Image (cartoon, rainbow, N blue to C red):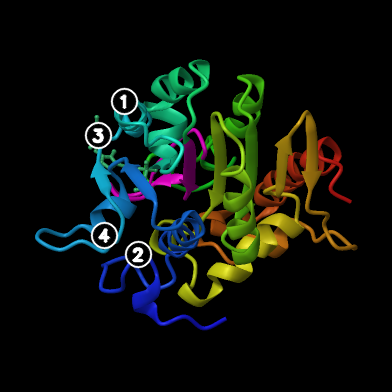
Amino acid sequence: MYKNPFEHLIAPGHTACPGCGQLMSARLVLDACGKNTIIANATGCLEVTTTKYPTSSWKVPWIHSLFENPSAVASGILAALKQKGLDKEVNVVAFGGDGSTFDIGFGLISGTWERKENILYVCFNTEVYSNTGYQASSATPFDANTTTTPPEKKSMGNNLVRKNMSEIAIAQGCIYVAQTTCGYPNDIINKVKKALTFSGPKYIEILTTCVPGWGTESEMTVQLGKLAHKTGICPVFEYYDGEYKVMKIPAPALKVEEYLKYHKRFKHLFKDEKGKEAISEIQKLADKNIDKYNLK
Ligand SMILES: Cc1ncc(C[n+]2csc(CCOP(=O)(O)OP(=O)(O)O)c2C)c(N)n1
């Protein structure tokens, strides 16, 4: 339903790119959390585009943290709220990009999970270090062209298979874990609301487009989020009480080309036979997801 832009808890006037999947998703997450929320935000595009001195788009208490430690800052906030007897009334939420979450902040996130702290951690996964010029992270997809993994004679781009952070969260005993994409706004809202009904560590990962980093069109953001799911590239699911609840892929499942063809970062895969082979490897990874999460 249409909402006056000024009613959102992230106000307009920020400097995110048109069609930024991360900004759109963060706004949905925060609206779902509501006003009684404190955010600890890692540095990255979301921070830089919303807090250009002396302005801020955030209408809730929002704290800048370092690249590596939004989770530790959130732990401190939670401890202070407990001291004041306010921890049941306020949502403590940490935001990080994939560079922050999968790579440099990984150890500190794991600490909050070990301590079973009542914090919602949301990773906006653009699959690259967007803010510093699209370097590969451990969330970067296989064979993607990034500034640190350019396709060369001996490689087709990133030659590593991405880390599965959601499964690590499950293995560490997070009480609620979910994955979704910027293609499903209502799903984002529902998952955040559901997560906040649990007390304990919660992890939500949202695949969000990075228009310049992926080389995609601004107006494709929502469609790409849907295609990532419909091809099996990004399983959409939630996990709690020991069970997965998945968003099934409508039959017939699309081939990965239907997603890859819209990205400049995968353009080199459409040139020759070697590219065809690479696409069939990516298809195998998607098929593995479809089997593992029973997506059909
Ligand atoms: C310790 C440290 N290393 C590097 C940087 C530089 N830096 C700032 S933002 C950023 C990339 C952030 O990537 P990600 O977490 O994926 O967020 P995105 O920009 O993609 O939203 C880097 C490398 C920093 N601020 N601190």
| Nearer to me, 293 or 91 | 91
Q: Is residue 151 left or right of residue 251?
A: left
**Any mark on residue 10, and which?**
2
The nearer-to-camera label among 3 and 2 is 2
| Labelled pair 3, 2 in contact (Cβ < 8 Å) | no
Looking at the rendered image, the quarter that the N terminus falls into is bottom right
Tell me the quarter of the picture where residue 243 sits. top right
Give the CA separation, mark 4 to mark 2. 11 Å
Which of disc 4 and disc 1 is earlier in sequence? 4
Q: Position of residue 123 (x, y in %)?
A: 48, 43
Which of disc 2 and disc 3 is earlier in sequence? 2
Q: Name the residue carrying label 3.
A: 66
Callout 4: SS: helix
Is the shortest distance between ligand 1 and the CB of mark 3 under 8 Å? yes
Tell me the quarter of the picture where residue 175 sits. top right
**Any mark on residue 49, and which?**
4
- Is residue 111 shown in magenta? no
Which of disc 2 and disc 1 is earlier in sequence? 2
Q: Specify the amino acid type for callout 1.
A: Gln
Q: Specify the amino acid type for callout 4.
A: Thr
Callout 1: SS: helix
Q: Position of residue 81 (x, y in %)?
A: 33, 32
Task: Tell me where the magenta segment starts and ends, as one range.
Answer: 120-139
- Is residue 124 shown in magenta? yes
Give the CA separation, mark 1 to mark 4. 33 Å
| Labelled pair 1, 4 in contact (Cβ < 8 Å) | no
